[in-house]
């Protein structure tokens, strides 16, 4: 409800606390402490379902945030072609847990990044906890195997703390798009029965 949306979601970081204000005071595409704000325009079954804006916590996990930002803008190129999320799918949607996307590897490995010639990169830190819905968190295949895949949490996920790097959040007003993805019918392996596609993406 409205009261829940206006409350402050506190993400503990190290000894202090990082407060993520759910009021979404984003000005000119800049989030808290000058953090970048990026977006996905999402379609389900070929029908546009809205824009999802996301603040990236560059003030806490700068390398992880920059990887995601550049995959949104397509400014990293390989063989002259942009590397990024445009045209990529949300390939796993689990109700009351998360939606997963970002597998943009050409070889099916599920790993590509802007670093190390596209190889995976390290776990930057685990300062932020999976305490609230709407968080962006890296998908990995074990320690220090971050690439392009990510999840958006739909509930608190404390079992991921210390294993997956939280690096951003969906703006509260745009969580409706994540919930539309959550409610798509799925088949085996929680794969959506309809194509769920990032048709456009970039930086605000």
Image: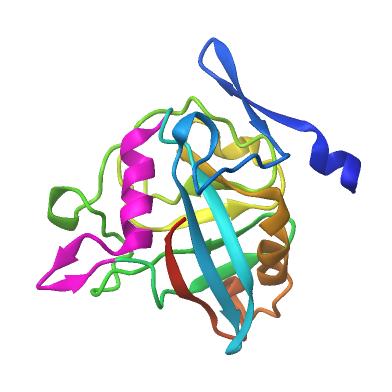
Residue 1 drawn at (x, y percent): 90, 48
What is the magenta range?
60-83
Residue 127 drawn at (x, y percent): 49, 25
Q: How many marks?
A: 0
In this rendering, the answer to whether 81 lies above or below 27 is: below
Give the side of residue 116 with respect to residue 180, left or right. Answer: left
Task: State the residue in front, 74 or 204.
Answer: 204
List the single residue furthest toward the top: 15
In this rendering, the answer to whether 97 lies above or below 199 is: above
Residue 102, picture quadrant: bottom left
Residue 10 drawn at (x, y percent): 68, 26
Task: State the residue in front, 165 or 59.
Answer: 59
Q: Is residue 119 covered in magenta?
A: no
Task: State the residue in front, 112 or 83.
Answer: 83
| Colour option used | rainbow
Going 25% across and 67% down the picture, which residue do you hit? 83
């Amino acid at each position: 409800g409205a009261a829940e949306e206006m409350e402050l979601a506190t993400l503990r970081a190290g000894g202090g606390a990082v407060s993520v204000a759910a009021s979404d005071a984003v000005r000119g595409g800049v989030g808290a402490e000058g953090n970048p704000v990026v977006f996905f325009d999402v379609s389900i079954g070929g029908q546009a379902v809205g824009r999802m804006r996301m603040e990236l916590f560059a003030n806490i996990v700068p390398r992880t945030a920059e990887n995601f930002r550049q995959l949104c803008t397509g400014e990293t190129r390989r063989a002259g072609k942009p590397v990024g999320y445009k045209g990529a799918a949300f390939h796993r949607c689990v109700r009351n847990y998360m939606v997963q996307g970002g597998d943009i590897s050409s070889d099916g490995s599920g790993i590509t990044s802007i670093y190390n010639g596209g190889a995976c990169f390290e776990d930057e830190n685990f300062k932020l906890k999976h305490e609230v819905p709407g968080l962006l968190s890296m998908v990995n295949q074990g320690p220090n195997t971050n690439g392009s895949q990510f999840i958006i949490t739909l509930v608190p996920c404390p079992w991921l703390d210390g294993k997956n790097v939280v690096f951003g959040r969906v703006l509260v007003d745009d969580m409706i798009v994540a919930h539309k993805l959550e409610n798509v019918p799925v088949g085996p392996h929680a794969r959506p029965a309809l194509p769920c596609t990032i048709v456009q993406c970039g930086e605000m």
